[in-house]
Image: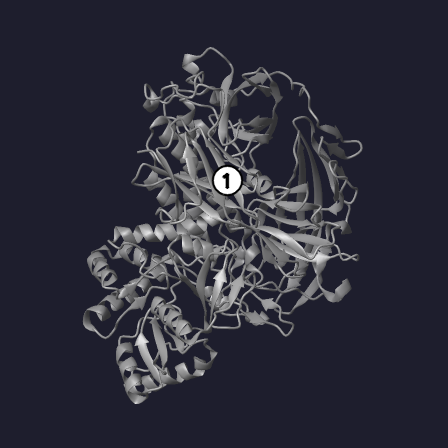
Amino acid sequence: MDPRTRAFVISHSHWDREWYLPFRLFQNKLAILMDYLLDIIDSEPGFRKFVTDCQVAMLADYLEIKPEARERLKAALAAGRIVAGPYYVPPNEWLINGEGYARNIQLARQFLKDLGMPGPGCKAGYSPDSACSDFGHPMQVPQIWKLAGLESFVGRLAARVSDFWWESLDGSRVHACKLVAGYSNAADLSENVDRGARSLVKAAKEVESRYLTPNILLFNGNDHLLPQRHIGHLIDRANEIQHDIAFQQASYEEYVAAVQVSVKQRGIEMPVYKGEFMEGGAHDEGGKMRKVNGYFSTRVYMKQANARCEQLLAGHAEPFSALAWIAGGHDYPATQLREAWTWVVRNHHHDSIPGTSTDAVHRECMTRYTWAEEMGTGIAVKKLNELANHVAGVPAGLAEESDQEDACIIAFNPHPWQYRGPITFNLMDNWLYCAEPSTRLVPLCYAMTQVAPPTFFITDNDGLRYPVSEEPIPNDTGYKFNQGVTNKHLTFVASLPAFGYKVFTLHPAEAAIESPGTDLVIDSAKNTMENEFLRVEVLADGTITLVDKRNGRAYARLLEIVDYGDRGDEYDQAPVKDSSRPGGWSVVSSLDSKPGIAWIETTPPRGRVDIEHVLALPRRLPEEDRTDHAVIDHVPVKVSIRLCEHATRVDVTISIDNRAGNHRLEARLPTGILADHVQVDGAFCTATRPAHFHQTAAMHRFVDVNDGKAGLGCLSRGIYEYNLAKDSRGAVIVDITLLRCVGVLAGHHIGNRWPANSVPEAQVPGTTIVELALASHDGDAIAGCLHRLGGEFCNPPRAIEPLEHLYLRGKCRKSLTDAAHAFITLTPSQLDLTALHKDATRDVVYLRFYNVATSPCEGHLDLALGKVPCSATLVDLNGDPVADQQGLRHENGSITVAVRPAQIVTIALSFA
């Protein structure tokens, strides 16, 4: 056993694609770095290897403008002189869903394969910005990592030791390495060999005692630094001038391997940490962990766009494409989908999606999201239309071939359980995204928009009639044949098969029809509406009371709007002082003034009431940390409450016309529940967290407060931040951050990091629309199926008018003979489907789901895809079979598999 300490010197550059400069300016700097690096590799045999910040975007962005360097780069990768991956970009892990995380790793692997590599050269996860900013890490990272064939994770983790096992709830473990001294403790060393070597030795001795074993990490690099040509010479000299520490230029994998040998030789048991690092690596005197606490709600429009794109691509575009390929033999748009995912994943960069960059950067981010959303919507509509053309009885849908005034509508439920709820569609979707530009080929829905009837109703093949609710599309700038016509969203309430379609007919009507058997009762005089499950009462102060008629629970004074002064920056919140307010902080409530209440929809299938507030916000002065009541900004806030027939949730749309700066707007939800924990939707998990009060945290589709018997959940479309407080009884109050407005990237006035760029667009002026829903339930969040409710809310059904476009003529055999059909059913309810997509090169479709519960179960899949798969195999995220097939059985389209607690399961369905 070598008694010496081994120092592993990591040569790297922490590379931000964009941050305080926009992408193209950083790309210019990147070209300089990469040119210099390749020159070093060609001329310095002692320069062993360079780690590209555990990402491949550095290489992709470089080759975009220097394609002539491709062969040199491939040679350096093949020789192990450049170590790249496993990320495409190092993401902010809290603001992306599980599929977004997986696609990041998969895109990196595919990029490296295109360069001739079998996979990522770097098999360690490295989260540098978590190292310096205390961002934290989700609980399923170890499992995702193991499923990607990766073994270790490096970051500033909230642990007391340098090396430990980090374990997910399913039992998956990775070797976690804590950055005990950041990622630049041996950066920018002197070019004088003796002086540089002494600095290297000094840096090693400073951290030596903080490591679990006689193996330490030194980081020769920092943000955007060029590699040091002479580092090999410094290492050689450091080894000559002393013999206590053996230095080598290395990779993370070499460090991890050495630690594993040391713990085995010395009989050391590495400690095990289970769960998430919700907060970062520092602790206050009370032991509570500290983190950056503002970026969850910075530039909320970015988060909303990301949620739309992730749900669109994984929830509609990919599944519809896979089904059209399986059932109809249509092409699978692998290249388009990869391009759309690449645009989204580039925005997952840790300085992009948090909203913590300059205004120019985030304008470019929104352009990428727009591209992804446009491409994804086009794919989803096209592929659903192709699938629909295989359904028997579906007409061509072209006005010249029909003398009827009715239009066929096909609605698809993207969830593997039966759906009953609202179905909303735009009459123009299919024509806009798919049809060829021919005046002869006019779909009936399009004709209806030109001479709009007074109203509509819908029927199904059984003759049931459904009333239709109409609503103009907000800020409609869509295609119009004539300027006086407004595109509309039409909504009806119906049942749909599990992961399947149902055919309906849309009829013009002179008057609204009655809804037979409706359970919705609206009494605008009493300010109430209710169905068989829920009752909503609007109070004079603009709050609502929600009563769950199934269990008798009542939740009062919901949806007070509260505004706080915020003198923080894009990273952190900081309250503003106001001596005139109780507690000394600047706070304004919607309860301070009387709202307007207007009933907009009073007949089935939906009731809607609008509550209109005007908040009088005093001017907040961040630099002076005070409130100026002499200047008032009036901010209108409209809260629209909707309750549909048969619904088990109440939809809430909040429209904010922001005319103020330096503030944070919240919706308050007093639950009345005494609880010491909350349950939160995250990446491939439902996390149970301690109820840390007055501390913001991240959620995805929901946050739920319950006492085990019943609870109240708040569902969200792209709003990621919640904050907990207590009422006078100690019951939990949930505050949902709707909008946070600041004017500086990083503020020295609150003791934060650089740079202090002005970012006026981070004040988010103008209109912001927030979509939430309230769901009361029995049991905890898992028993109450909040993951299902959240899935239905965030990824609703899609409906279109099928059109037999010219390119489809003669190609669509009517192989789907039923007017309603379920392609996939997944049970039990604790399993949640996240993906159905085809392999880019093989006749294999991947179906992925995860167990939201911490208890095992037997999963059952019933497949009616139009073809029976030849085989079904459990695979990892790379598409490779896993050793333990967990008793998977496949017979004639029925699959059974044992599922571990919180396990992520991917099944490869082979069709060749």
Q: Quadrant of residue 78?
A: bottom left
Nearer the observer, 367 or 659: 367
**In the rendered image of this protein, does residue 844 appear above or below residue 502?**
below
Report the colour scheme: one colour
Q: Residue at x 54, y 54 (%)?
A: 299
Q: Which residue is mark 1?
A: 859
Whole-percent x and y of residue 565?
Answer: 66, 60
* Secondary structure state at the residue bearing disc 1: strand
Q: Report the quarter where the C terminus lies.
A: top left
- Name the amino acid type tagged 1: Gly
Residue 137 spot, x, y in % from top left = 51, 60
Crowding near the residue tagged with mark 1, few <14, some 14–19, many ≥20 C-alpha atoms within 10 Å:
many
Q: Nearer the viewer, residue 203 or 153?
A: 153
Residue 781 or residue 826, whichever sits in front: 826
Residue at 28% x, 51% y: name it: 113
* Residue 353: image location, x then y, percent: 48, 54
- Residue drawn 80% across the image and 33% down it: 526
The N terminus sits in image quarter: bottom left
Quadrant of the image occupied by residue 229: bottom left
Count of numbered labels shown in the rendering: 1
4 shown above or below 769: below
User: Can I make out residue 755 in this image?
Assistant: no
Query: Based on the displayed image, in which of its 4 quarters is residue 893 positioned?
Result: top left
